[in-house]
Structures are given as structure tokens and as C-alpha cells.
Image (cartoon, grey):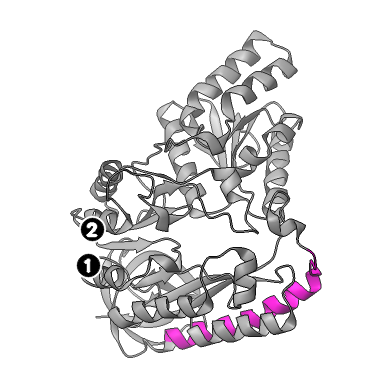
Amino acid sequence: MKRKAALHNLGCKVNSYELESMQQMLEKAGYEIVPFEPGADLYLINTCTVTNIADRKSRQMLHKAKKMNPDALVVATGCYAQAKGKELEKDEAIDLVIGNNKKLELIELLESEWASRGAGLPEEMQEADALRQSVIDISKTNEYEELNIDRTEEHTRAFIKVQDGCNQFCTYCIIPFARGRVRSRRKEDVIREVERLAASGCKEVVLTGIHLSSYGVDFDTEENLLSLIRAVHEVEGIRRIRLGSLEPGIVTEEFAMALASLPKVCPHFHLSLQSGCDRTLKAMNRRYTSAEYRDRCAILRKYLKDPALTTDVITGFPGETEEDFAASAAFVDEIDFFETHIFPYSRREGTRAATYPNQLPESVKKDRLHVLEEIDQKKRVQYLERAIGTVQEVLFEEQVNRDGKLYWTGHTMEYRRVFAVAEGDLENEIRRVQLNGLMGAEGLVGEIR
């Protein structure tokens, strides 16, 4: 009889990719994948530790799993598991901890755990043995863990992990300690995976990583992110290439000119900002100024027609004054982003910023967040409105109900969301659409041509 496995993911697109890979490993090993509900034999939670809230959510899901079936095997993997392995060893709700760069050994570790249970070993011996096998010192490995997928659950769009780790050590960020140093995936392995996904019908791939801009810096060759993009561009069947979060420093005249010459590359760029105030950027160890960031945005707009620029901003960083925040908000308004993802500063034990004086109250962080949310809402609508009256290619993904009416919805190359009424099945189809108006701030309403 097949064992039943329920999986849950927390965190970023890299985590999502890794959970898809682990799911496919479990399927090949004979497990039946079931919903994250009572009745599973195995609960696997891919955790996140980017903020205190992420830690709390990770703990809650692990405890929820054990309550759903006290006899099930509860497995913690991912960044929270890596960062807090010793603590989780003492948590009675968790049976096995698998850190980063050990996910490839998932099936072997599970079989060892099932065997230990069957042999009736004392619980404390099981836990200690499992922890030794499954959590390494991530800072001391140069090996890229070659996870892969054969298909994507989204059907239309596949996230492809091409890089792991980060060497930046921003003062607020715990991720280099949970993910280790930069490790890049071999181009040949990336292309093989993209070819498999294209053969399965996938039309769009998103290249992603923990610090995508660093792709190739650990190689002895001249491979870099641009050479990888060019190689993916040659894969037959792939119609669109989208990029994950980039550091502004990667955007040069050469980089932008090259991307503009590749028609499959989507003019949609997430350039991490974090603050528009130079004093705060320096305290964050972000390694660029607001003027340099502005120049990189101008380069993208020089070579690509009205690209969608999106970003992240932190509010309430330690020591951020009212003047600092006003400068940051004015900069966000000036750059004219399509979307701004805003986060209140989260104090992370083990980071430099956690020791900084002048930690701000949560109320101040939230008040500043609301100011930026108003700017974001205004800019989203303005960017959507600029497309009204144009004809765009839309990759359709799913059917949704809005006010009792069924629409097919998908995205343009710039990632504007589009709603259109149509008969038949449009999932994973690319169609030309006349964009006629707004669906609020959610997207655009169009008519298939």
C-alpha cells in the first residue's frame, strides 16, 4: 500500500521550485501525493526564515501537521530547518530535519527514518542520528545541489532554479547564513531541464535563484547570467523568458542591449531597491547609491520599450529618520515602478542590523508602509492605463469569475494581467488581445483579436 505524502511550501520561488522537485522525487519513489489535510503518513514542510513571521509560520505548520496525525512522519526542510536545526531537534512535533543542500537525499533519509521506527530504536537516538545525516554547515560547501523537475504544476510557467547562496551579507538579511555562499548550476543542466519542460508543453520559464545576478561568479569559465539567458533563448518551444530578482549593478549598457535583441526575453525586471535613501542604503550594506540605481533604470528604459520595473522596499530600518523615509518615498515615486513590494523591517537575530541602536517601533514601520502602499497603488494603475488601446500577446493561464462573469486571464510580456471573455480552453495558449480598459487595479479587460 502506498504511503501518503502531504506537502506545504513557505517562502520564495526558489523554495517553490525545490518543493516541486521533492514532490516528483516522492512520486517516483511510490508515494501518493495528497492534500495537506488529516490522514497523511508523511507531512513535508519546506520552511522559510527570511523574517520572524516566516519563522513563526514555519513552526505553526509543523505543529499543525503533527496535530493532524500524531503518528505521521513530520519533516522540516528548507531555510528555517537549516538555520534552527539544533532547536528543531528538541521539538517533539518534528521527526526529521533536512537542511539545505541535503534535499537530494530526501528518499534515503525517509527510508532510514521509517526503518528506525520499524526497528523500535529509542526516539532520542532516531532524532540525533537523523540530524547528523541531514543538516550540514552550509557555509563550507561549494557544491550546487542538482535538484530538477520534469514538469511544472502551473502548466504554463516554470520557475527554474539556476543559482543558490549569496555573498552580499546585507546587514538585515539572514539568508547567506541559511543558504551559504554563491553556487551556480551548470548551464548544460539548466538547458536539459528547460528542454524537458518545453517538451511537456511549457511556454514560459522564469530563471530564479537566491542571488540571480551572481550566476557564474563561482565558475572558472566566462559563463554568466547573460550567456545563460542566450542559451535558454535557443531552446525550441520556449516562447518567453522571465528573470527573477536582479541587483541593479548587473544592468549595464551591454546587458540591456543584449536583452533587447532577444525577443523571448520579457521586458519585466525586478530590481531590488530596499531604500531610496543613501544613508539607509549604506547602513544596509547595499553597495549602490540611489543615483546609481536611477541610472540602471534609465538604461533599461533606453533599450526596451516601457519595461515593467518592480522592486522591494523595507520601511522602518533601524535609525531611519522621518527625513530618510521621506527621501525613500520620494525616490519610489520618481522611479515610477509598476509594482513595489513593501515590507516592515524584521529584526533577525544573527544579523548586524539586529544590534543597531534606534530600533523603530512597529507602529512607525506600519505607518510608513501605508504611505508607500498608496504610491504603489497609484503607480500600478498608471502603468496598466498606458497599455489601454494597444494590442498585446497574452499567455492565458486560468479561468476566473468576476462579478458572475467568466473570464480567461493571463499576462502580457510585461506581466500586466489581462481578462478576456472567450469560449473554449485557452490554458497555455498565446493570443493577441485588444486592451480596452481596467479591471480596477487588478489588471486590464481585453478582447481577443
| Residue 363 x, y percent position in the rendering | 80, 73
Q: Nearer the viewer, residue 51 or 198?
A: 51
| Residue 298 x, y percent position in the rendering | 38, 82
The answer to which of marks 1 and 2 sits earlier in the sequence is 2
Which of the image's four quarters has the C terminus?
A: bottom left
Q: Secondary structure at mark 1?
A: loop
Does the magenta-highlighted stretch encompass residue 361? yes
Query: What residue sits 48% from the left and 52% below the top?
Result: 210
Looking at numbered disc 2 in the image, what kind of residue is underneath it?
A: Arg
Q: Secondary structure at mark 2?
A: helix
Dots 1, 2 in contact, CB < 8 A: yes
Query: What residue sits 47% from the left and 43% below the top?
Result: 18
Q: CA distance from mark 1 to mark 2?
A: 8 Å
Q: Which mark is residue 262?
A: 1
| Residue 185 x, y percent position in the rendering | 36, 43
Does the magenta-highlighted stretch encompass residue 310? no
